[in-house]
Amino acid sequence: MMMRLAVAGLFFMVLGSVGLAQETAPLQDPNDVFWAHAPFEMGECGICHVANDPAAPGELIAEVNDLCFSCHEIFADMLAEFANVHSPVEDSCTSCHNPHNSRREKLLNLDTINLCNECHDDIVSVATNSPVRHDPVTEGRACLNCHDVHASNVEAMLTGLPFDLCVDCHSDDEMTDESGRPMTNLKSLLADSHMQHGPVDNKDCSACHATHGGENFRMLVSDYPAKFYASYDPDNYELCFGCHETDVFASPENANLTGFRDGDRNLHYLHVNKDRRGRTCRACHEVHAAPQTHMIRDGVPYGSSNWVLQINYTGTEDGGSCAKTCHPTKPYSRRGS
Ligand code: HEC
Ligand code: HEC
Ligand code: HEC
Ligand code: HEC
Ligand code: HEC
Ligand code: HEC
Ligand code: HEC
Ligand code: HEC
Ligand code: HEC
C-alpha cells in the first residue's frame, strides 16, 4: 500500500507541472483523492497502458471504452440493449470518470451539477438562475433524481415514465412551495377525481410545466395569472388559450361558443373579462383533475389564509347552478331563463 502510494506520488510530482491541480486531470494528487480505481490502486498500469511501469506507462493499449468494457461488461450490454444511450457514454467513459482515482465517489470528475454543466449549461443555467426554480433539479441527487446518466429505455433518459416521476414525488399532503404554501397532493387528487384534464389524462405534465425551472408562475410554459383576480388581457391566459378558444371570453353575447351562458348571455365573459378584478379560471375550474364535470372545483382557496370558498356547482342538462357563496344561488340555462 505504502509503496503504491509512493509510486503514484512520484508520478504526481513528475507531472505536476502540466496542470494536475485540475479536477479533471488524469492523475490527481494522491494526497487529495477519496476514491481509487482498483486496477490503478494495484499499480497495474499495464492493464490499460502498453507498459506496466508506473514511471513510463506509455500509450493506452485500446480505445478507452473497450478498456472499460473488458471488466465492466455490463456497460457493453447496456449500450447495445437500451433504447437511449447518452452520447458521451458512447464516446468515452472518461468524459465523466477518471480512470485512476478521484476526489469524488465513483471516480467522477466533478459533482453532478458541474458535471452536467460541462455540456448542458443551458439547462443548468435555467435550473439555477430562473425566477421560479424546482428544488429536485438542483438538490439531493439533483439531475439524477429523474435522469439516468448512462442509458435508459425511457425518453430523455428518464429513470421512469415522466408522469410517474412527477406524481410519485407530488404525493404528499405536507408538501409546500418555496414560500411555504401547501401544494396539491397530485396522487390523491387524481385518484379521487371523476375527470382529468385532457393533457393530464395524456400523462403530459410538460404540456404546461417547464420541469427544470422557468420565468412564469409555477414554472408554467406560458402566462397564467397567479392570483384569484386579474384584469383581463388574453395575453395573461396564453397558457389556456394555447389549447382553448380566446373568442369565448371576448364578447358579452354569445350564442354558441360556450356552454357557460344564460340564453345568449356569455357568463364566461361576465366573470372573467373585467378591467379590474376579473375572476381567473381558478375561481371555478381545477386545472389538473376535478371531482365533477367541466373540471369544476368543489371549493377554491380564497385570500392569504387559504380559507376554502365552497362552490357547490350542480350541472343540469342545459345549464347548471352555483349555491350561494359568491352571490345568491344562480342557475343558468342555455335555453334562456
Ligand atoms: C483502468 C485502465 C487504466 C489503468 C489501470 C491505468 N490507466 Fe492511466 N490512463 C487510462 C486512460 C483511459 C487514460 C486516458 C485518460 C483520458 O482519456 O482523459 C489514462 C491516462 C494516463 C496518463 C495521462 C497520459 C496523457 O497523455 O495525458 C498518465 C500519465 C497515466 N494514465 C498514468 C497511469 C499510471 C502511472 C498507471 C498505473 C499506476 C495507470 N495510468 C493505470 C487508463 C488507465
Ligand atoms: C481490470 C479491470 C477493470 C478495468 C479495465 C476497468 N475497471 Fe473500473 N473497476 C474495476 C473494479 C475491480 C472496480 C471496483 C469494484 C466495484 O466497485 O465494482 C471498479 C470500479 C469502477 C468504478 C466505481 C464503481 C463504484 O461503484 O465505486 C467506476 C466508475 C469504474 N470502475 C469505471 C471504469 C472506467 C471508466 C474504466 C475504463 C477507463 C474502467 N473502470 C476499467 C475494474 C476495472
Ligand atoms: C455523462 C457522464 C458519464 C459518462 C460518460 C459515464 N458515466 Fe459512469 N457514472 C456517471 C455518474 C454521474 C455516475 C453516478 C451514478 C449514481 O450515483 O447513480 C456513474 C456511475 C458509474 C459506475 C458505478 C455503478 C453505477 O452504475 O452507478 C460505473 C461502474 C460507471 N459509472 C462506469 C462507466 C463506464 C464503464 C462508462 C463508459 C462506458 C461510463 N461510466 C460513462 C457518469 C458518467
Ligand atoms: C461530455 C458532455 C456531456 C456531459 C458531461 C453530459 N452530457 Fe448529457 N448529453 C450530451 C450530448 C452530446 C447529448 C446528445 C445531444 C443532445 O441531445 O443534446 C446529451 C443528451 C442528454 C440528454 C437527452 C437525452 C435524450 O434522449 O433526449 C439528457 C437527459 C442528458 N444528456 C442528461 C445529462 C445529465 C443529467 C448529465 C450530468 C450527470 C449529463 N447529461 C452530462 C453530452 C453530455
Ligand atoms: C424532476 C425531474 C427532473 C430533474 C430533476 C431533471 N430533469 Fe431533465 N428532464 C426531465 C423531463 C421530464 C424531461 C423531458 C422533457 C421536458 O419535460 O422538458 C427532461 C429533459 C432533459 C433533457 C433533454 C431535453 C431538453 O430539454 O433538452 C436534458 C438534456 C436534461 N433534461 C438535463 C437535465 C439536467 C442537466 C438536470 C440537472 C440540472 C436535469 N435534467 C434534472 C425531468 C427532470
Ligand atoms: C424528487 C421529487 C420531485 C419530483 C420527481 C418532482 N417534483 Fe415538483 N416539486 C418537488 C418539491 C420538493 C417542490 C417544492 C419546492 C419547490 O418549489 O421547488 C416541487 C415543486 C413543484 C412545482 C411548484 C413550483 C413553484 O415553486 O411554484 C411544480 C409546478 C412542480 N413541482 C411540478 C413538477 C413536475 C411537472 C414534475 C415532473 C416532471 C415534478 N414536479 C417532479 C419535488 C419533486
Ligand atoms: C393544462 C396545464 C397543466 C398540466 C397538464 C399540468 N399542470 Fe400543474 N399546474 C397548472 C397550473 C395552471 C397551475 C397553477 C394552479 C393555480 O394556482 O391555480 C399548476 C400548479 C401545479 C403545482 C403547484 C402546486 C399547486 O397545488 O398548485 C404542481 C406541483 C403541479 N402543477 C404539478 C403538476 C403535475 C405533476 C402534472 C402532471 C401530472 C401537472 N402539474 C400537469 C397547469 C397544468
Ligand atoms: C395542452 C393543451 C391544453 C392546455 C394548455 C389547457 N387545456 Fe384545458 N383541455 C384540453 C383538452 C384536450 C381538454 C379535453 C377536451 C375538451 O373538452 O376540450 C380540455 C378540457 C378543459 C376543460 C373541461 C371542458 C369540459 O367541458 O369538460 C376545462 C374547464 C379546461 N380544459 C380549462 C383549461 C384551463 C383553465 C386552462 C389553463 C389553465 C387549460 N384548460 C389549458 C387541453 C388543454
Ligand atoms: C365563474 C366560473 C367560471 C370561470 C371564472 C371560468 N369558467 Fe370555464 N366554465 C364554467 C362552467 C360552469 C362551465 C360549464 C358550462 C356548461 O354548462 O357546459 C365552464 C366550461 C368551460 C369550458 C368547456 C367549454 C365551454 O366553454 O363550455 C372550458 C374550455 C372552460 N370553461 C375554460 C375556462 C377558462 C380557460 C377560464 C379562464 C380564462 C374559465 N373557463 C373561467 C365556469 C367558469
Image (tube, rainbow, N blue to C red):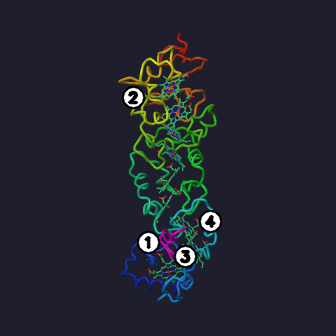
Query: Mark 4: is the Cβ under 8 angstroms from ligand 3?
Result: yes
Q: Is residue 182 visible?
A: no
Q: Amino acid at mark 1?
A: Thr
User: Of label 4 and label 2, which has the lower sequence position?
Assistant: 4
Indicate which disc, 4 or 3, sits on the residue closer to the N terminus: 3
| Quarter of the image where one finds residue 224 | top left
Marks 1 and 2, how far apart at CA:
52 Å
Mark 1 Cβ inside 8 Å of ligand 1: yes
State yes or no: discs 4 and 1 in contact (Cβ < 8 Å).
Answer: no
Q: Disc 4 or 1, which lies upstream in sequence?
A: 1
Identify residue for label 3.
37
Q: Which one is nearer the viewer's eye here, 131 or 224? A: 224
Cα distance, mark 4 to mark 1?
Answer: 25 Å
Who's the residue at 46% across and 50% down the image? 212
Count of numbered tags:
4
Which residue is situated farthest in the top direction here? 337
The image quadrant where one finds the N terminus is: bottom right
Mark 4 lies on residue: 78
Type of amino acid at the residue the image marks with label 3: His
Sequence-wise, the earlier of marks 1 and 3 is: 1
- Residue occupied by mark 1: 24
- Tell me the magenta residue range: 90-103
**Do the residues under discs 1 and 2 have CB atoms within 8 angstroms?**
no
Local secondary structure at mark 2: strand
Tell me the kind of residue under disc 2: Ala
126 and 84: which one is in front?
84
- Can you tell which of label 2 and label 3 is closer to the viewer? 2
- Mark whose residue sits in front, 1 or 3: 1
Q: Nearer the viewer, mark 4 or mark 3?
A: 4
Mark 1 Cα shell of 10 Å, populated few (<14), some (14-19), many (≥20): some
Is residue 63 shown above or below 333? below
- Above or below residue 336? Residue 102 is below
